[in-house]
Image: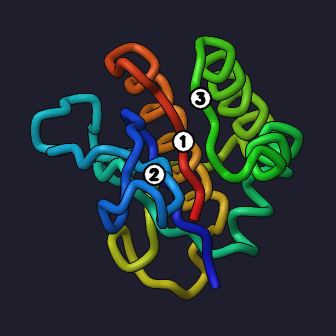
Amino acid sequence: MGVCISIGNCYVEKPDGNLFKSKYTLAIENFDSEKINFIDGECDSSYKSNINLSCWGKLLRDSDLVDWWENIIENEADHQLTHEDVGLMNLAIKNFKARYPNAKPGYPGVDGDYEDYPLENSLLSRLIWLQKWVTWTVKNCKSPAIHIA
């Protein structure tokens, strides 16, 4: 089981078009990540990521983002991103690297075998992904948000 995180420009979506019978939902615009040039091989390029729950929990604990995440979940899994979130992401990277000074961003199967591959390497890649997308979204989107499904 995992969690799906989308980061980008938020808009109101009407699933069936019936104004009176459907609930409005929030959605994140699809982005053509080929046009976004901040990805440099340290992390995935997509604005959307599926993450294993146990790995995600470890990442949140090891980067001191548990309170931030719980705030998002308490607010129905949607959160407007601000410059404060960018600062939190930068601090999270610093905290994580302090705990794992030898971590190098990467994923098993891409950078080598799964056997003996340090988990902190792929967690650092996920955290870099989060930090880069939050930063880009706050800087470039009219309605910057993160959506959890």
User: Is 138 in front, or is 93?
Assistant: 138
Q: Is residue 35 left or right of residue 5?
A: left
User: Is 11 in front, or is 80?
Assistant: 11
Q: Is residue 100 above or below residue 8?
A: below
- For marks 2 and 1 on the same chain, the one whose residue lies earlier in the sequence: 2
Under mark 3, the amino acid is: Gln
Q: Quadrant of residue 143?
A: top left
- For marks 3 and 2 on the same chain, the one whose residue lies earlier in the sequence: 2
Q: Position of residue 116 (x, y in %)?
A: 61, 81
Q: Position of residue 73 (x, y in %)?
A: 77, 52
Give the residue pinned by disc 2: 6
Q: Position of residue 44 (x, y in %)?
A: 35, 54
Give the residue pinned by disc 3: 80
Check the picture and name the quadrant holding the C terminus. Answer: bottom right
Element under disc 1: strand
Q: Is residue 42 left or right of residue 59?
A: left
Q: Residues within 10 Å of mark 2 (few under 14, many from 20)?
A: many
Contact between labelled residues 1 and 2, with CB atoms less than 8 Å apart: yes
Give the residue pinned by disc 1: 146
Residue 91 circle label: none
Look at 62% across and 49% down and name the residue there.
103
Element under disc 2: strand
Look at 65% across and 32% down and name the residue there.
93
User: Is 24 in front, or is 33?
Assistant: 24
Under mark 2, the amino acid is: Ser
Q: Position of residue 6 (x, y in %)?
A: 45, 51
User: Is 65 in front, or is 8?
Assistant: 8
Look at 70% across and 69% down and name the residue there.
55
